[in-house]
Amino acid sequence: MLTDAAIKALKPKDKLYKIVDRDGMYVVVQPSGSIVFRLDYRLNGRRETLTLGRYGPAGLSLARAREKLIDACPSSEHSAQLAA
């Protein structure tokens, strides 16, 4: 599971990469150094991706991203379909 300290320690690379958290949530580290929270889930058999926001002073904290994850989760009948 990700922590704020672990996210702060992430360094940009030549290509973007992702670090998985839980319940379909992960962060994408872009070559520019920006870090974005995203959520993968399944709806009607299709994989969907929701961008929750950027990490940092002008963006989201890890705790706020997790709150948005809870708010963004589809209804209970679809929550079982969240992508791992």
Image (cartoon, rainbow, N blue to C red):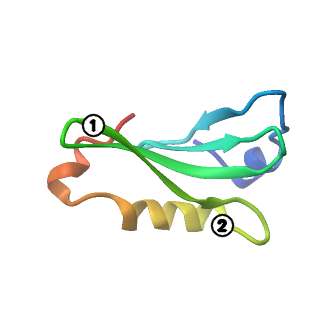
Determine whether the residue tagged by mark 2 lies in a helix, strand or loop: loop
Mark 2 — residue?
60
List the single residue furthest toward the left: 77
Q: Residue at x 72, y 33 (%)?
A: 16
Q: Residue 30, percent across and down?
A: 75, 41
Going by the numbered disc 1, the residue's amino acid type is: Arg
Instruction: Using the numbered discs, state the Cα–Cα distance from disc 2 to disc 1 in whole angstroms.
Output: 27 Å
Q: Are marks 2 and 1 in contact (CB under 8 Å)?
A: no
Q: Residue at x 19, y 57 (%)?
A: 76
The mark nearer the N terminus, 2 or 1, is 1
Estimate how packed mark 2 is, as few (under 14), some (14 to 19) or many (20 or more) residues with alpha carbons within 10 Å: some
Q: Residue at x 78, y 51 (%)?
A: 34
> Which mark lies nearer to you, 2 or 1?
1
Left or right, residue 26 beside residue 73: right
Residue 17, by quadrant, is: top right
Left or right, residue 1 beside residue 3: left
For the N terminus, the quadrant is top right
Q: Residue 64, percent across and down?
A: 57, 68
Q: Nearer the viewer, residue 4 or 77?
A: 77
**Which mark, by number, is residue 3?**
none
Determine whether the residue tagged by mark 1 lies in a helix, strand or loop: strand
Q: Nearer the viewer, residue 28 or 62?
A: 28
List the single residue furthest toward the bottom: 58
**Which mark, by number, is residue 46?**
1
Q: Residue 10, percent across and down?
A: 80, 40
Going by the numbered disc 2, the residue's amino acid type is: Leu
Left or right, residue 69 beside residue 32: left
Q: How many marks?
A: 2
Left or right, residue 83 beside residue 26: left
